[in-house]
């Protein structure tokens, strides 16, 4: 029987941990699926780690990794993948918005040959601003990067161990794991589901974190930002020449005087804005190059339980 590893990052989820682990067992036991659950405590400041220690002491197939501090959601998922022994690995959150009832369907698709099983949140029961920001984010990601999987695709997915071999040997996963998996090009299927409301606590993805994640997706998997600067240059240079030609014509032919400096001042202000945006984009690329060249660890583990 194949082993399925379920990787769950945790950040201040003390209200959910007991229930989500129990629900996973209840959902999977009838299907006789051999599985292990790997919880990664990503620097929680509540009682999450204490609860996880209790859970792993009660069940041998529950494993726990504890970080020295908060390294981020993507790093926590990567740590779980690094320590998973499964023939397939499922990554999901602990907030009940990734329903465990979908796991048997994901496993079935995998058994039928899919190397990756993505899940698409067809209906989101989130607040309006959360749904709006997510819609904008996924639209930008689909239209301005090399990731061409349309839909509300997040980190609730199954990947085959063949993909894990590549992930363990690359630094690319640190910023945007879902992008790397999509980029690999393995056969995949997408399962739709209705995303329920969060049962406890609040989302750990603030607007700033969502923005950073979006930038990782676009900057790591697209040259569009750089090409955007080139396109703007092609548009703005002829526009500047038109301004200059108009000034020369108006001065030499019509002998007219117009306060064009006002229009030029406004144009310069707009151009300065574009310049700052482009400088920022270049700085993002340089920052990522610098970050990778330092070769710092993606995460630091403080403790491991039930893991050799």
Image: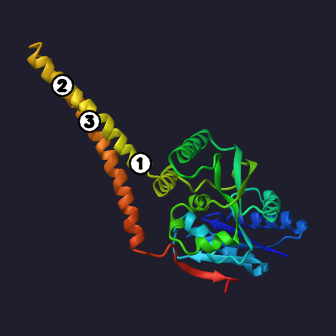
The x and y percentages for residue 68 are 52, 76
Residue located at (69% from left, 44% from top)? 125
Q: Element type at marker 1?
A: helix
Q: Quadrant of the N terminus?
A: bottom right
Distance between the alpha carbons at the discs numbered 2 and 3: 12 Å
The x and y percentages for residue 2 are 81, 74
Distance between the alpha carbons at the discs numbered 3 and 1: 18 Å
Q: Which mark is residue 245?
A: 2
Q: Earlier in the sequence, mark 1 or mark 2?
A: 1
Badge 3 is on which residue?
237
Residue 44 visible in the snapshot: no
- Other-residue count near label 3 (Cα within 10 Å), few / some / many at <14 / 14–19 / ≥20: few
Q: Nearer the viewer, mark 3 or mark 1?
A: 3
Q: Is residue 273 above or below residue 112?
A: above
Q: Nearer the viewer, mark 1 or mark 2?
A: 2
Q: Which mark is residue 225?
A: 1
The x and y percentages for residue 233 are 31, 40
Q: Is residue 259 above or below residue 123?
A: above
Residue located at (39% from left, 44% from top)? 228
* 287 vs 95, nearest the viewer: 287
* 248 vs 301, nearest the viewer: 248
Q: Is residue 63 above or below residue 179?
A: below
- Tell me whether the residue at label 1 lies in contact with that at label 2, contact meaning CB atoms closer than 8 angstroms: no
Q: Residue furthest right?
A: 30
Residue located at (20% from left, 30% from top)? 265
The x and y percentages for residue 21 are 76, 67
Residue 251 visible in the snapshot: yes
């Amino acid at each position: 029987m194949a082993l399925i590893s379920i990787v769950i990052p945790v950040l201040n989820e003390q209200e959910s941990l007991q229930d989500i682990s129990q629900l996973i067992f209840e959902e999977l036991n009838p299907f006789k699926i051999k599985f292990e659950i790997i919880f990664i405590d990503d620097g929680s400041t509540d009682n999450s780690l204490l609860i996880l220690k209790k859970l792993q002491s009660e069940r041998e197939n529950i494993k726990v990794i504890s970080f020295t501090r908060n390294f981020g959601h993507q790093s926590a998922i990567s740590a779980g993948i690094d320590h998973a022994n499964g023939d397939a690995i499922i990554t999901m959150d602990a907030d009940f918005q990734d329903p465990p009832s979908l796991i048997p369907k994901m496993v079935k698709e995998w058994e039928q040959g899919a190397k990756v099983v993505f899940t698409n949140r067809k209906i989101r029961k989130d607040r309006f601003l959360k749904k709006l920001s997510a819609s904008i984010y996924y639209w930008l990601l689909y239209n301005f990067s090399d990731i061409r999987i349309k839909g509300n695709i997040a980190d609730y997915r199954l990947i085959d161990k063949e993909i894990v071999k590549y992930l363990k040997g690359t630094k690319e996963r640190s910023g945007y794991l879902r992008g790397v998996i999509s980029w690999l090009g393995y056969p995949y299927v997408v399962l739709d589901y209705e995303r329920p409301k969060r049962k406890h606590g609040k989302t750990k993805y603030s607007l700033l974190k969502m923005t950073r994640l979006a930038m990782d997706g676009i900057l790591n998997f697209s040259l569009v930002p750089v090409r955007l600067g080139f396109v703007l240059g092609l548009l703005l240079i002829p526009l500047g020449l038109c301004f200059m030609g108009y000034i020369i014509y108006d001065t030499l032919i019509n002998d007219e005087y117009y306060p064009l400096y006002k229009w030029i001042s406004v144009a310069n202000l707009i151009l300065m804005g574009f310049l700052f945006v482009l400088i920022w984009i270049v700085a993002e690329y340089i920052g990522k190059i610098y970050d990778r060249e330092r070769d710092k660890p993606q995460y630091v583990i403080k403790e491991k339980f039930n893991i050799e």
